Image: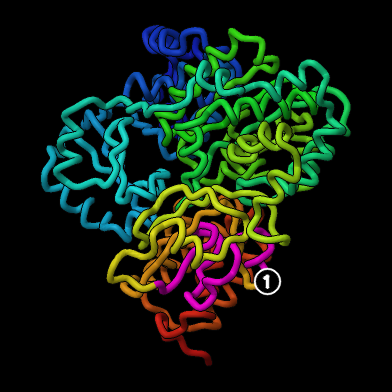
Amino acid sequence: MLNSKLTKGIKRDPSLPKGRQTDDISEKEVKEVLGDLPLERSQLIEALHLIQDEFNCLSQKHLKALSELLKISQAEVFEVASFYHHFDIIKDGETINHELTIRICDGLSCEMSGAKNLIKNVADLIDKNKIRIQKVPCIGRCDNAPAAQVGKRAVDNATPLKLVKFSKGKLTPEIPEYQNLNDYINAGGYNCLKNVIDNKLNLETAISILSNSGLRGLGGAGFPADKKWQIVNSYDGTKYMTVNGDEGEPGTFKDRFWLESEPHKMLEGAQIAALLVGCSKIYLYMRDEYPAVLEILKSEIEKLQKTNFCLIPIEIRRGAGAYICGEESAMIESIEGKRGLPRHRPPYIAEKGLFGKPTLNHNIETLFWIPDILSKGADWFANLGFNNNHKGLRSYSVSGRVLNPGVKVAPAGIPVKKLIDEYCNGMIPGHKLKAFFPGGASGGIFPAKMCDMGLDFGVFEPFGGFVGSHAVVILSDQDSVLDAVINTIKFFKHESCGQCTPCRNGTEKLISLLSKSNKEVELYEDLMMVMRDSSICGLGQAATNCLNHLLKYFPEELNGTRR
């Protein structure tokens, strides 16, 4: 009796190994889709992208075939595929009903511009059997909110009728006009790199210039660029360079702006940095939410490789919709074909980074400034700051209730009020400044009375905030700070990688409390302390900054009580 119970229902062919079996047709399909993609573990995410691009989903049979081709377990393939938001996994026997996905951003700037109503109203106009509406975090088009993507085509200032119209048109990305390779070279581009190649500019001199210029990492942390070069250069052996183009911080779109207008400045900066520091390869990690940028980079890098200016090989790696991969060690895990889980530090990636080798990591904008700084000198850049306490220029992504949002190239340290009045033509008529985010969702939210503070590293830190990626979101007297805080915490809950309990459960608990209008201030403070002190990476540590400022600067909106 026991034996019959154990064997009942077993259909496996005893001549085959245990587990899901692959089939010749699925393996052939996957091989054809992958083409000449190297069958390496680190290429897993790109392989998943190619399969999804072709079949509009990831089926179990194709995941199994991929595991066979890459010689890794099905569990590894599934855990990676299920980690990233852009992959749609279906079970055996299931099919994808929709032919098209419309992604509508519900980030802060888009929510302020009516994204909730847009999502509701467009759903009433489409054929739900053919079109899927998907709410997604910030897609980096905050200056044209509400923003959406129909297939791979961006839609600015979206309306229900506009989205329906776009769903019937071209679904490929629209490529903006930009400075191509020939135009860049004719304008003097790659002359600085030529000086490096001709040994007219060495590492020691370059580090000195960068140090005196005050150039810092402009992806969020603000670590001095020259120090990175010194540290990575101090290690022997193989070294790599990574370029972080995964600007997922809500309110940030400056890197997209530069790559869609002057991509070769970044590419020249990357070649200079890699060549001087001794990196053998450059890995460019770019958001999948930026299909136009990806097309531009593929085209221009291909052209660059045919010149004498591409001494260090460049490989593009696509992200797959995970904000956490903006954290440098999580990005490296993703490039290696794994889930984007932040690593424990030390060791830092400068010592043990990509594939276990010393790694130089830079942001897009940081690299953008390098050719000009090394060509024009440290003083040229340093003297462009707002005053002697602030050096250089910054690309501020400004969105919200200003009359003229967009990327504003302004002096480092410029006061918020001056940025609004002189670079954005003031507030929208009828709106009065109430609050502002100096550095996106994680940088905190401050009241209008602090708008004379300069936007630069080190200014907001004493008040529990930071300028980070320089994403400035402006709120008016017609906005609710409480609603804005809830939006940011929902974002962090959605984007938490789940690796550590304080972040994973803390964001979930905060949303539960806020949605129920809980007013126990001590409870919020206890949760915030645990998350700040115990989370592995900056996501969990900074997720509560806005809530902290809500309690401190806008207590009337929560109307909380203390025991």
In the rendered image, which quarter contains the N terminus? top left
Where residue 541 appears, as percent x and y from the top left, is 62, 61
The answer to whether residue 221 is above or below residue 260 is: below
Q: Residue at coordinates 32% horizontally, 58% vertically from top-left?
A: 111
Q: Residue at coordinates 41% horizontally, 74% vertically from top-left?
A: 434
Where residue 290 appears, as percent x and y from the top left, is 43, 34
Residues drawn in magenta: 433-462
Q: Is residue 489 left or right of residue 458?
A: left
Residue 372 occupies which quadrant of the picture?
Answer: top right
Where residue 345 appears, as percent x and y from the top left, is 76, 48
Front in this rendered view, residue 129 or 157: 157
Which residue reaches farthest bottom?
563
The answer to whether residue 176 is above or below residue 381 is: above
Front in this rendered view, residue 181 or 338: 181
Determine which residue is flagged by label 1.
Answer: 462
Q: Is residue 164 magenta?
A: no
At label 1, which amino acid type do we have? Pro
Q: Is residue 9 visible?
A: no
Q: Residues within 10 Å of mark 1 (few under 14, many from 20)?
A: few
Its colouring scheme is: rainbow
